[in-house]
Amino acid sequence: MESTPESNVDNNLFTNTVKAKDLKNHDYVILNEHPCIILKITKNGNKVHVSGKDIFTSDHYEDSFDFDADVISPIVVKNTYLAIEVCEDRMVTIFSDSGEQLPLECSSTQLLQNIKQIIESGDEEVKVVAITACGKSLIVSMVTSKH
């Protein structure tokens, strides 16, 4: 399936465009409308074949582009926030950079349980690491420190 920059995830606030010929392993790219990290690139003639992993779900996607085509690259940001509590539906309440309490989704049930256990023990402070791309944020890891 051939991608085009007219994909419905193209939003100037969340993406850039790059030439397919300039893509490298570990760059970020939109594959089949999913923000992915590139795992493998094959350049053959006037085509670039890209394999990648969705940064939120870890699902694998592949796509091909013309060598000189503009492709969409998501702007991916990692932030660390103080976790306050674990809520229902895989959500964690965090303090944002502006001091607001906001809910963020957690990537795995096991990580969610670990965060909850440490918060409830009260022995350590929990900071969560969240990735944000294409207007979506997801907690992917945590770090702890003594109060």
Image (cartoon, rainbow, N blue to C red):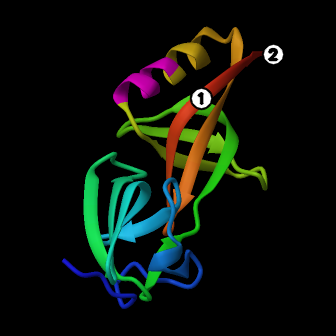
In the image, 114 versus 20, the foreground residue is 20
In the image, 82 versus 87, the foreground residue is 82
Q: Badge 1 is on which residue?
A: 142
Residue drawn at point x = 69 percent, y = 41 percent: 80
Region in magenta: 109-114
Q: Badge 2 is on which residue?
A: 147
User: Is 113 one of the magenta-colored residues?
Assistant: yes
The amino acid sitting under disc 2 is His
Q: Tag count in the figure?
A: 2
Dot 1: element: strand
Dot 2: element: loop
Secondary structure character of the magenta stretch overall: helix
The amino acid sitting under disc 1 is Met
Q: Is residue 97 shown left or right of residue 140?
A: right
Q: Position of residue 73 (x, y in %)?
A: 50, 73
Distance, label 1 to label 2, CA atoms, is 15 Å
Q: Is residue 23 above or below residue 128?
A: below
Q: Which quadrant would the C terminus be assigned to in this image?
A: top right
Q: Quadrant of residue 66?
A: bottom left
Q: Nearer the viewer, mark 1 or mark 2?
A: 1
Q: Is residue 97 shown left or right of residue 7?
A: right
Q: Is residue 95 shown left or right of residue 120?
A: right
Q: Quadrant of residue 58?
A: top left
Mark 2, residues whose alpha carbon is within 10 Å: few (<14), some, or many (≥20)? few
